[in-house]
Amino acid sequence: ATSGLVIADSVVKNGPADSEAFAQGLFCGCGVDARELMDVPTSNITVRDTRFLNLAGDGIHLNDVVGSHIEGNYFHMTDPERAETHVDTIQALKGADHVIRGNEGYGWIHGILTTDDAPQDGPDADNRAMVVENNLIDTSSNYAFNGAPGPNSLIVNNTWTGSDDGVAKGAIVRWTVGSKPGTTTSAGTIFANNVVDGNQVTDQTPARSA
């Protein structure tokens, strides 16, 4: 639980699996795990130009964080069988004002997973729940992008590839109504100029589509 943390130009590798992490009193076997803790908020987190190698948990895990910049990072999972059932390259749960830009990821089970709350007046707030742009994500199975990202988000110029044997008809991109249907939607989101190698499924149509 902190504000203004910067992690840059680092190497993070070979963390414990989630079950091992819990046994050690940690939340997850993630490379970076940022979240609200005991009602103390976490905000304005920057992770840039860092390499995440062969972790057994998420590369970056954000939970109820307001304001993040996840930019220019490299993720490589060389042994996906070592990971537990559900791990993501980047996971952003709830929160707002996230910028996920210019990241490159290979071999994680999933790519970018987002859930959404309404935009908040966090650091650098621009009334967007999320900006996801110029990322290259290739997964070993299941989704390369799984949203909803929240209202007025900008999802542009990404390349998403992966396996076609995942759930939901082998979707590479899966678009959902969000964690709280009716109150947290992706209304006003722009989804454009993305390259998707595989299927897309959606139960909510974004404002624009590729």
Image (cartoon, grey):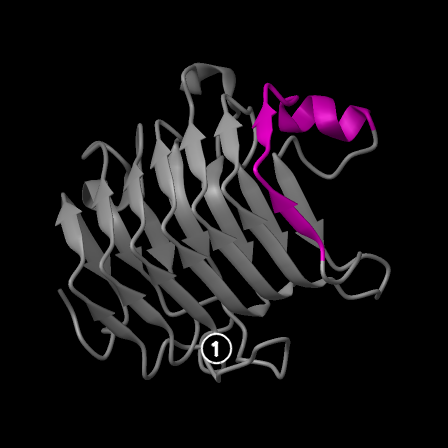
Against 131, residue 165 (above or below) is above
- The image quadrant where one finds the N terminus is bottom right
Residue 11 lies in the magenta stretch: yes
Residue depicted at x 73% and y 27%? 21
Where is residue 24? Give x, y as percent: 82, 25
Residue 148 visible here: no
| Residue 136, quarter of the rendered image | top left
Residue in front for this viewpoint, 37 or 178: 37
Residue in front for this viewpoint, 210 or 176: 210
Against 76, residue 103 (above or below) is below
Where is residue 108? Give x, y as percent: 40, 30
- SS class of the residue under badge 1? loop
Residue depicted at x 59% and y 18%? 14
Give the residue at mark 1: 184
Residue depicted at x 86% and y 59%? 38
| Residue 28, quarter of the rendered image | top right
Q: On the rendered structure, is 182 left or right of 170?
A: right
Where is residue 54? Give x, y as percent: 50, 21
Residue 153 lies in the magenta stretch: no
Residue 202 visible here: yes
Kind of residue sitting beneath label 1: Thr
Give the tally of numbered discs.
Answer: 1
Residue in front for this viewpoint, 92 or 106: 106
Where is residue 40? Give x, y as percent: 84, 65
Against 56, residue 204 (above or below) is below
Part of the protein shown in magenta: 5-24
